Image (cartoon, rainbow, N blue to C red):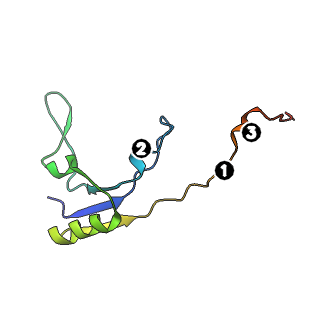
Amino acid sequence: MSNSVRIYRPTKTAMQSGLRNTQKWLVDFEAGDAPVADPLMGWAGSHDTNRQLRMWFNTKDEAITFAKKKGFEYRIVDPQSRPQRLRAYADNFSFRKIS
């Protein structure tokens, strides 16, 4: 059983345009043991069920408090800031010279 967790805010995937799942903090358990190949089917499996858990928190402090309370070693991955491009709606229709 893995006793370490990773606390982070997920990034926006390339397949979505919104920021819905990027505002909350996520706690994931680190991989405890390597996946084992099933001899019959060849599927990858594991005895570590904590890898299936994903817990969402509203703030980073709530996630840290949870990890400390449960006695988990935690690693915080700070999110990269996205540059804000403030544009007016009229910019969609402005003339732009293609060079």
Residue pointed to by mark 1: 86
Q: Is residue 94 above or below residue 67?
A: above
Question: Callout 2, which amino acid?
Answer: Arg
* Screen quadrant of the C terminus: top right
Picture quadrant of residue 67: bottom left
Q: Residue at x 25, y 54 (%)?
A: 31
Q: Earlier in the sequence, mark 2 or mark 3?
A: 2
In whole angstroms, how far apart are the C-alphas of marks 2 and 1?
A: 19 Å
Q: Earlier in the sequence, mark 3 or mark 1?
A: 1
Question: Callout 1, which amino acid?
Answer: Leu
Residue pointed to by mark 3: 91
How many marks are shown on the rendered structure? 3
Can you give x and y, in whole percent of width and height, for residue 53 in the image? Answer: 20, 49
Dot 3 lies on which element?
helix
Question: Callout 3, which amino acid?
Answer: Asp
Residue pointed to by mark 2: 20
